[in-house]
Image: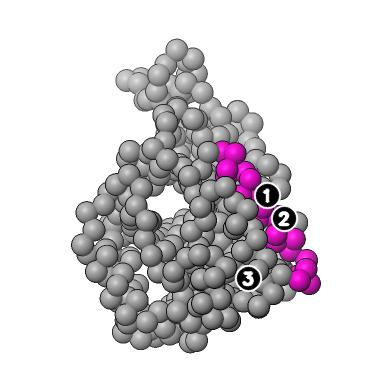
Amino acid sequence: FSIYQNNLIIYGSKTTPNQDAILSLIKNQLGVRRIVEDSSTSKVYLNKNGELVVKSVEYRLDTDLGTPLYTFGLLSDIHIDGDGSDEAYATSDFNNAIKFFTDAGCEFIAHCGDMTRDGRDVDFPALKSCLDASRIPNYTIRGNHDCKNTVDTYKNATGMEQDYTITKNNDLFIFLSLDNDDNRAGTGGLTQAKVDWLTNLINNSNHQRIFLFYHFFFRNTCGDCGGGAYTSPTIGDTTLVSYAQDFVNLVNNTSNLIFCTGHSHFKFDYQDTYPNANYYHVDGNCYHIHVPSGTKPRIISETGGYTNVYEESEGFLVEVYEDKVLFKPRDFIANKYLMQYAYIVEL
């Protein structure tokens, strides 16, 4: 758990704990003598008598962060299906998420790849129809499924280049597509030219924050629930070629970088079991954020492997403040935030 802006955020609980349980948890974990609830206080603090004084105890993040500089939506793995043969209802789920982000005042939607079900010719026109109808920009990248068709087909549907940047306030957004899906565990879908381009961007950046969107996550960071539940290849499963290893080193060693990835689809609530399922950070290194699927999140099967949950849809609404970034998990079908899985990046 953590205390932020006078409120308690509980991590790792599948049910909302009652107030007595929360207060007991705080007391035991912090070793305080007793807890005083005082509605007149302006902050949480430990007084000279060893008593923890709290303004309120709630199972949500307080909105007293002030007004964000800007907000954006964050999705991954929408897998738009052009002929309806997949039961994901991807088009309606995607349109529903777009409407939510638009109504919430987001300035754009950032994606982490796998825009199409399988990169088929029939998938891209369906994707283009959704994007054309959106009233806010969608900044997309290619994932491994999208690489099953040509770069030109992807560009025609999305209007986006392979790799590009945008800036917002003093923040840099880098959108990095897979170049191919060959030997993903060894090359990571990268090329030497792509890594050189990214290295030059990051090394010459004077931006406060850098957001990097890529499809593949790094094994044993976040995205694979405990270091192996995701059985398909990703970066780090084998020895990387030199430029792919340079990419990993560059990303990990950039302390003001927020690395957003998809690929595994695993649901937010695996954070209950695996502390690094959705978020991973080592002091001095970048921040890793895993984004579940916007159209078919996955659960780990009891017999191994995983199962798509077609009737669910998950993603983040991201609020950017002067010195922090709040990632607010959203269940678009239940129409609610899942604040027990929220993260605050202090940058």
Which quadrant holds residue 263? bottom right
> Can residue 309 be seen by looking at this rendering?
no
Disc 2 and disc 1 in contact, CB within 8 angstroms: yes
**What numbered label is drawn on residue 96?**
1
* Residue shown at the point (58%, 72%) measured from the top left: 230
**Mark 2 secondary-structure assignment:** helix
In the rendered structure, which segment of residues is drawn in magenta?
Answer: 83-104
**Mark 1 secondary-structure assignment:** helix
Which quadrant holds residue 88? bottom right
What is the spatial separation of the Cα atoms under label 2 and label 1, in whole angstroms?
A: 6 Å
* Residue shown at the point (64%, 58%) measured from the top left: 130
Q: What residue type is labelled 1?
A: Asn
Relative to 118, say whether 29 is above or below.
Answer: above
Residue at numbered disc 2 = 92
Depth-wise, is mark 1 or mark 3 nearer the camera? 3
Relative to 212, say whether 240 is above or below.
Answer: below
Closer to the camera in the image, 223 or 179: 179
Residue at numbered disc 3 = 124
Closer to the camera in the image, 103 or 191: 103
Give x and y (percent) for residue 284: 27, 57
Disc 1 and disc 3 in contact, CB within 8 angstroms: no
